[in-house]
Amino acid sequence: EYTITVPSFEQGLEFSSRFENGNLKKAIRISKIEYELHLSEDYGTSGHYHWFYFKTTSKFTEKTTVTFSIVNMTKPNSLYSVGFRPFVYSVKKKTGWIPGGQDISYTPNPSDPTLKSPKKYHTLKWKYTYEAETDHVYFAQFVPYTYTDLLHHLRSLHSREMRIDVLCRTLGNNVCPMVTITEKAETYLSYQYEREIAEKPRKLRKAFQNYASNLRSRLELKKAAWNYSTESPARRNKLEREGSESQETIGRIIGKSKELEMALLRHREDHGEKKAVVITGRVHPGIALRCVVGEVPSSWMMKGLIDFLLSDTEEARLLRRHYVFRIVPMLNPDGVVYGNYRCNLLGYDLNRQWKHPDRALQPTIYYAKDMLRQLHEEREIKLFCDLHAHSGQRKVFMYCCSHQGTEEDVARRNAGVRVVPLLMEQLDEHFSYRSSQFQMEKCKETTARIVLFKELEIDCSYTCEASFFG
């Protein structure tokens, strides 16, 4: 006979990550006060682990310190080794998201010779003390910024200096918003008008006129083919009705053509002399390999940027007067929703698809590049910047591009590239010019920064990295 004893979990933790941007695959209870945690990999991949975001529900009758160990993290180096801590949100304490936990360590796992292709995993370990009462405590790599947070932020903005368009829909059928900020934004053509009208307005008008002319001709031929005087009343009514409907259609076509031409005229009068600045972000939802993080901090930077550009400060008004700001706040909405940390739902690292993006497989990159190309044809793009974050270095810095050669013009253009990061350091103590790099590595030739530098000849094409740890 065997006796099976089922352990009681009345005084333990319950785990959940079934919410937007959450990531926790499983939790193994080692003891009442120790849990081993495993993260899920990105959808469509077999090796991207690092972003975590999960909820615990405590059922302790006394103050208890619990040890958590995430055992399948893949990054070899981390700011946890120099004092960075997980972020914690306690529903009971109502303190908001704050760095929390004690006795934090980040160490490589012992190698397992039984595995054919052992991955080099690392373990993040920390302790957290629960009070003697039921509480819901969330843990995350960084203060979360979800797709829903973005939509709520955009809906809360009410300004005549801004318009919001849909860049495209994602593989998961989520909307990818695009924000245009400039003075008199109400007269700036929508993205749909830009794609369908602004490129070739004369050709479009001619097409409208040809269609209307053909419609009239078909109607006259039909009248000529009928002996109107001998037709029955029902047939005559039908002919008159078709003629009336056709005239209405012709009127709508000509009216629409004039309406579009007037919109284009206002667009050129109000915005014809402005230069363009394009900002993108959150192409990587969570945390990425090689210490490059794209990701949650980039959304917080983007939020601050949008709020500043729409503010009533003298600097913001001056920028809106002279520039058109095109902003795509979240290039990978699907990855954010499903808790990925680098890829989209098909396992593509979207920041490596800018050279030849596929409209079906990487729609946000395809349409973002298409938008940039059209904008480039209309006006000069003075600056492009893709916002990311970094989990291996401190402060804020930039990855920049540079021209090859020794000619005077090349030297002048390369000096111009360095002006922006140099000014950033002078304006903000958190920016580091020394940490900025001016190389174009071969492994990054398909990133937004390098592709746009080469194909659209945007000298000031940057990746801006902000440290997780300040």
Image (tube, rainbow, N blue to C red):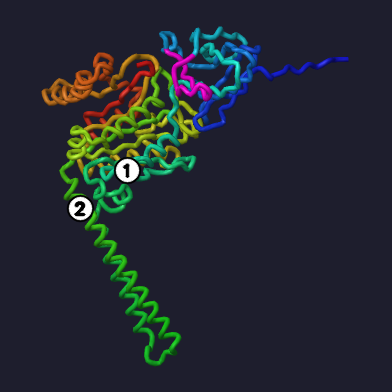
- Name the amino acid type tagged 1: His
Quarter assignment of residue 391: top left
Task: Report the amino acid beneath label 2.
Answer: Arg
Percent position of residue 292, x then y: 39, 20
Residue 209 is at least partly visible in this image: yes
Give the labeled residue for mark 1: 158
In 3D space, how far apart are the residues under numbered discs 2 and 1 (Cα atoms)? Answer: 22 Å
Q: Is 21 placed left or right of 309 in the picture?
A: right
Position of 103 relative to 448 (above/below): above
Residue 258 occupies which quadrant of the picture? bottom left
**Highlighted magenta segment, given as a residue range:** 84-100
Residue that label 2 marks: 266
Q: Residue at x 37, y 91 (%)?
A: 229
Residue located 35% across and 14% down the image = 393
User: Is residue 47 visible in this depiction of the protein?
Assistant: no
Indicate the position of residue 287 as horizontal and vertical percent values: 44, 22
